Image: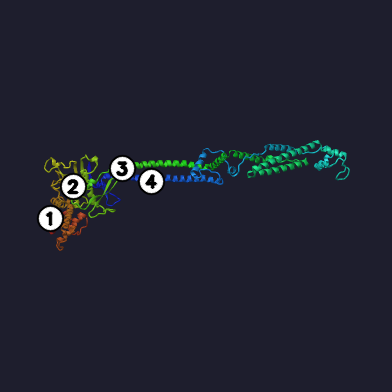
Amino acid sequence: QILTFCEKFTEENFKKTPDFKGVFSLNQANQQIDEKIKAEEINIQNIEAFIKKYTNRIDLIELDKTTKKELLLDHCWTQRTVFRTFGKINLVHSGSKPNHLGKIQEILQNPSNHILSIEELSGQYQNLYERDLKEITIGVDTKDYFQIRRLENKLNQLLHEVIVGKEDVDIAELIEKLNSRTWVEQGVKLLQPTDRICPFCQKETIDQNLREQFEKYFDEAYKEKISEIKELKEEYSQKSEKFADNIKELQKSFNPNNIVSDLFQSLISLFDDNLEIITYKIKHSNEKKTILSLNTQKSNLSSIIKQIKQNNELYKDLDTSKQTLIEDIWNYMAENCSQEIQEYESKKIKYSRIFFMCNSRKNIYETKITTARQNIETLRSQTVNTKDAVDNINIILKNAGFEGFEIAEKDTLNNISRYFLKRPNITNINPVFESLSEGEKNFISFLYFYQLCLGTDDLKNNSSKKKIIVIDDPVSSLDSQALFIVSTLILSLIQRKGQNPSSDKKLLKNTNIAQVIILTHNIYFYKEVSFDRRPICTDFWHYKISKLNNRTSVTGSYNKTVSDDYSLMWQTLKEIKAALPNNSSLNIMISNSMRRIIESYVSFLGYGNQSWDALSSEDEDNSSYYIKCAFISTINDESHKTSALDSVYYQKIIHEQPQILFDVFASIFKIIGKEHYEMMME
């Protein structure tokens, strides 16, 4: 197992939480698990949004379905109001609209083919409940009816016939011309056998010849037809009177809505009119006439006969008739509700399809939520316990006298502990936590890395593996106290089994660590972990890596303890001075090293922070003052590429005579630190 401490390790294992300032979690695995859990939680939220959408759709459909059902119930229930005047009828289901609808739906399963009108139902109700129902023993005499009809046919044949006397009689032409047949016929009847004088002219014109002509004109055939009409009239009068009396008698016991009395009046009028027509025909036999047939009252007669029959049937089985009326009322209401019920049933089918689709989608999404929650629980079970590591870190801080903070647990989220820096004399941690500095973050990250190196976690799959530890610049942004702790912990990791020069000296005391690689830019840290008494390696060499003219060179080969940066700069000057004048290409290094040495020295003595501060105690009247000013300008220009102060004294001296730089450098140190110069240059 390779464990590497670097900037990436800090980024991956030290996780600041966005919700609380200064709160963090540890371990890369926990962070990855936390991110996966959050992704699953977002997935659950998205899925719940879909479920809510389908739930809302179901609710809307349920609301619409309920509304349509209420409208249907109201529509069906209002059909009862049509029969509000049927006060003596109990339609049952009167207290429940759903029961009322259920009754109608039951009827529509086997609907009636014959639906009575509201008028018919009202008549039935009046007959069965409002009228004193009794049996009608008198009926329409159909025998008389058909006899009258036969008489009508015979009469109409004769009435339609033109009846005249014998035409070959002398007086016939005159009678026909005067159209006085009836007058003559009546006059003949008035003549007495002995009468000879005409009632008009008062002369004896009525003789035997005239009498004989009258008798021939009104012969037996004529008389027979007139006689037949008279006989039929008499029979018709008797039959019609009898038939009218039958209807008159019927109206005494049966006359609903005056239908019988109205018929009686119509019959009397019809019979009287017909008798007048027949009488007129007898008097005017040569005119065609027609009487009105009793058949014109057939429908009224049939209706009365039918109602009498119904009445008697009702009377015969009153209870059954009442029940039949109730069934007819329900059939009437069912017929008026059938279309609305069919429309509602069609909508119910659509509702069911939508419900099925929405519930199916909901079930799919709910299954996904269940899977996501199971994934979350599985992920939570895979988290790494960092509590032991944090406890050990706090012990290290306490034992090292580090009092700036300790790590405390704030809470646990998704089975992952979240921490904050508990600082001295601060008790309130909510709701704002003090922010972490970059150095503190790096320091905590390294302390946690140290625990991983020791194996203080519960990652079982790594428990049996040896470790290669790579530490890259662990003291970035650390103060001296933290740097000391880091150095000490690294030394404990690379501690040897023994100090004697034997084979054990090369073995690490921690047998789980196979190799340690340390990379750093910090000389102090390097010295801390590699000085003589506690060396990193049993065999080591030091090299100097230089880069000139964009070319890298490795020089030196020594196994002494490395000095600090300041000593190395003096060492560089000595090496360059020894190489003069053979290598003038080192002039740029001369300027840079001299400038840094002067700045470090005057800063240490308190003169200032710049190389110019080395001339602060120089006498400006001294002739060497300007030479030294030119020197300062030169080394600054060569080091920083700034303009020289005085080009009169600066004649590219470093390119031609670099020794002059060493001379002036020595002259300046004679003023600010002669003994120090001699010590460093040996």
Residue 314 percent across, percent down from the top left: 59, 39
Q: Amino acid at mark 1?
A: Tyr
Q: Residues within 10 Å of mark 1 (few under 14, many from 20)?
A: some
Q: Is residue 188 left or right of residue 409?
A: right
Q: Name the residue that disc number 3 marks.
A: 377
* Distance Cα–Cα, label 2 vs label 3: 37 Å
Q: Residues within 10 Å of mark 2 (few under 14, many from 20)?
A: some
Return the disc, 3 or 1, that comes first in the chain's sequence. Answer: 3
Return the disc, 2 or 1, that comes first in the chain's sequence. Answer: 2
Secondary structure, mark 3, is helix
Q: Name the residue that disc number 4 marks.
A: 49
Return the disc, 4 or 1, that comes first in the chain's sequence. Answer: 4
Q: Nearer the viewer, residue 462 or 219?
A: 219
- Of tags 4 and 1, the one toward the viewer is 4
Secondary structure, mark 1, is helix
Quick check: can you spot residue 499? yes
In the rendered structure, find residue 489 and report the number of the disc placed on it: 2
In the rendered structure, find residue 677 and report the number of the disc placed on it: 1
Q: Residues within 10 Å of mark 4 (few under 14, many from 20)?
A: few
Return the disc, 2 or 4, that comes first in the chain's sequence. Answer: 4
